[in-house]
Image: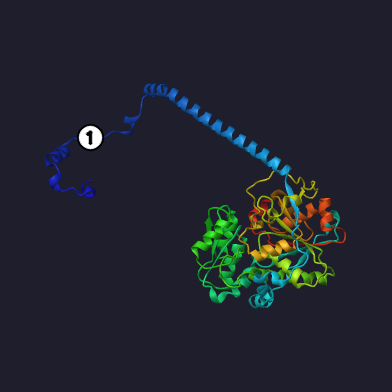
Amino acid sequence: FYDEFEIGEDFIDQELLQSVDEMDTSMFMMDDDDFQLGEDEQVQVQFKNQPMIQQQQQQQQEIEQQEQYNRRQEERRNQQDETEHLKNAKLYVINNRKRKKISKADYPHLRKPMDKNAITLLRRVFPNMQPTPIVRLTAFEDTLHVKRIFVKDESRRSDLKSFHVLGTTYTMLSTQATAKNYTCATNDGNFGRAVAWTSNVIMKRTEPAIVYMPMDTPKKRVESVFQAGGQPALCSGDYTQAINKCQQEDRGMMISEAYQQPLPMLPGRLMCGYKVIVQELAHQLNDAGCEPTHIFVQAGSSLPAAIAYYYHLIATQKPVPKLILVESFFHPFFFKLLDNTQDMQAPPNHPLLGFTHGPQVKNTRLQGLHHHAPLLHDEIQLIMDTFDMFLRVFDNSVQRCMKLLFQNQQQIYSGETGAAASLTALIWSASYVDVRETLQLNRNSNVVIINTEGDVDTEFFGSV
């Protein structure tokens, strides 16, 4: 005590100290039994405190009952709002802004990178690279009244089980002289995992890529970024806030679908990498003796723009296949850009999907289908100029299609933002008469779906 407070001897009462030393301290030493109350005393204390304890318990019960009542009321209101919302929901919108004729000059930021051959550069890194397979869904063709349905299975592209590795690898290889480190912002972690892996394995960077992700990103997807060699950085807010923080901290070259990094000719490089998928697809379908009439593709990346650029500005196929973009129901971007007068009512329930309008959760797992305004203007314009229809899908129907694809004769592992989303859109389109007529979806149709990701989140995939 003295040492702790550094009290000198001049400030100590020596007489008091001596009296304390001479004191018989045994009188203060007590056993544990000395602190135990007798039975009569216990009953008396308990009797005196019982009304107060009962009052506290009653108050606590009342508080818990009120909280439970409030929760039930809130759930009931949300359910009523959701039911009313879904009852009047519009899932389809025809693109009334599609142009009859476009040229490469209309998209100056995309023309130069998209005219390059990404395959040559990618094969230097992946000498054993082979086209991913196309799988035919024969079990669905008669049910949906179409001729053929093909799935381009990008889940077999690499160990990452995703198509993103093509875009990130090509982008980094073509800009490696100007980048010491890489960063990115991602909406569900899938793209960020590809950036982390490419930076670590292909580019051999000593510093891990910084991947900015929304706080509500599923835990398994955050872990997958770390396992790929990246450094996850969770941000409050949504994808847009992740992009802003990535730009503000400026810890390396930003590889992002948003293209807000002011690097010359960076726009279009991801598209050029993804163009490899479309080139493989066109060659494989040609070998199969058919041409695609409809392509369903998920939103959320530069892949839709790459498909549109290839078939409208590079390929010689005529007529050009009809393009359908699939978005998340609760977070559509292109859907909202179109006039409400062109909306179509939701289709009836389809036996493959069960009840279309089942209970929905606004905390959707379809973050990977979210497009955002920071997307390059040329890409937005290209999609608006070429796509025929935009539609929205629900979580529960997509999860049902994940199971249907897994039960296919040739199993397809599809994540929630993979082929399952586009298969859901195809089933809805086939079940709605007006949509079938608008898209000319019939017995002569060759439909293509792109499985952009496999069972990346193995835990969620297993639960489904």
Q: Nearer the viewer, residue 168 or 325?
A: 325
Where 458 sits versus 278, above or below?
A: above
Snapshot quadrant of residue 153: bottom right
For disc 1, the neighbor class at 10 Å (few under 14, some 14 to 19, many from 20) is few
What is the residue that sits farthest to the right in this orientation?
Answer: 443
Asked whether, in this view, residue 275 is left or right of residue 243, the answer is: right
Residue at the image position 20 percent from the left and 49 percent from the top:
6
Q: Is residue 451 visible?
A: no
Query: Is 39 or 126 nearer to us in this picture?
Result: 126
Residue lying at 49% horizontally and 63% vertically, measured from the top left: 249
Residue 368 visible to an observer of this rendering: yes
Task: Name which residue type carries label 1.
Answer: Ser
Q: Position of residue 186 (x, y in %)?
A: 59, 60
Q: How is the image coloured?
A: rainbow
- Which residue is nearer to you in this view: 7 or 181? 181
Q: How many marks?
A: 1
The residue sitting at 62% across, 58% down in the picture is 373
Instruction: Please give the residue where the numbered disc 1 appears in the rendered image.
Output: 26
**Left or right: 185 in relation to 433:** left
Side of 425 where 272 appears, left or right: left
| Rendered position, 232 above or below 37 | below
Task: Give how far across and how far down residue 286 sits, in percent.
Answer: 82, 71
For mark 1, give the secondary structure: helix
Residue 236: % across, % down: 53, 53
Residue 120, position in %: x, y? 68, 78
